[in-house]
Amino acid sequence: MGALEKIIEKHCSRPKRAAVLMFYRRVAVMRRGTCASTLNLECRSSSCALGASIMLTLLHGCGRSLLSARTHQNFRKSYYSAQMAKRVAVVLAGCGVYDGSEIHEASAVLVHLSRGGATVQMFAPNIEQMHVVNHLKGEPAEEKRNVLVESARLARGNIQDLSKLSVKDHDAVIFPGGFGAAKNLCTWAMQGKDCSVNGEVKAALQAFHGEGKPIGLCCISPVLAAKVFPGCEVTVGIEKDERYPDTSDTAAAINQLGCKHVSKSVTESHVDGKNKLVTTCAFMCNAPIHEIFDGIGSMVQGILKLA
């Protein structure tokens, strides 16, 4: 079933569907010179969108009350949303703040992407975690876990190996925070500015950057950009503010790497237009969860505008 047929099925009652489809085909035939490809109802090009617009206009302009005014409006909205939906990759680092992706941050990213009409595919490296932390006791546990397997908990099973991430299939990429970003995606938690970045993570960052596609990072994950893109601008919060206990040291290390740290509050994000990086501090701030969500919302909005 084509994209247009699905929208017709959603917004038109069963008795009207066949008539709407038939009329659309007639309009497409009349405009074969500019929109012949719409006959197969699969095309997602701008010319196909033009054909849909023409069809809807004629349906009303010619006095054919096949669609109500509200259905007409919903039809247009659904069709153009389908044409313009951004495809965003989200890279996870496990499941849990102390040894994986921060769950609330990852959820906030997904909520705001959904609200923005984006389509999402999640990825994670198929590697062993640096270590496992008992989150009840806040101490290491004597066991081993896999980053991809643990990330699947957050993704409800719908996740792929990071090695399969292709920049051509996505318009942007986002890295939520959590200690996993500093332990599994790189070794910042142990080595600070002298850390190394996982090869697949580095390749993904460089691929999106090379294609001029935006990259979103929150909490501690902006250090990935600081390691991979010398001279970039990021934020991990406000320096010398007790609400941001780890920001000053992290910002100093970022600056030592030749990058620029920009102080931003938890509800804000910073856009590095040159490098198409959008960052927000998230849980680098001791803030109520709604403020974390607001800041991540600002980051996601920035990403979708650049995509």
Image: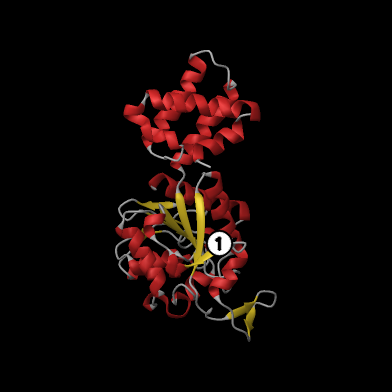
Q: Is residue 270 above or below residue 45?
A: below
Q: Is residue 147 above or below residue 205?
A: below
Amino acid at pointer 1: Phe
Residue at (36%, 59%) from the top-left corner? 208
Apparent side of residue 112 relative to residue 305 in the rendered image (left or right):
right
Q: Is residue 67 above or below residue 157?
A: above
Which residue lies most toward the bottom here? 142
Label 1 element class: helix
How many other residues sit within 10 Å of disc 1, few (<14), some (14-19) or many (≥20)? many
Q: Is residue 217 visible?
A: no
Apparent side of residue 239 relative to residue 194 in the rendered image (left or right):
right
Q: Quadrant of residue 229?
A: bottom left
Q: Position of residue 98 (x, y in %)?
A: 58, 73
Q: For mark 1, what is the residue? A: 283
Apparent side of residue 148 relative to residue 29 in the rendered image (left or right):
right
Q: Position of residue 75 (x, y in %)?
A: 54, 30
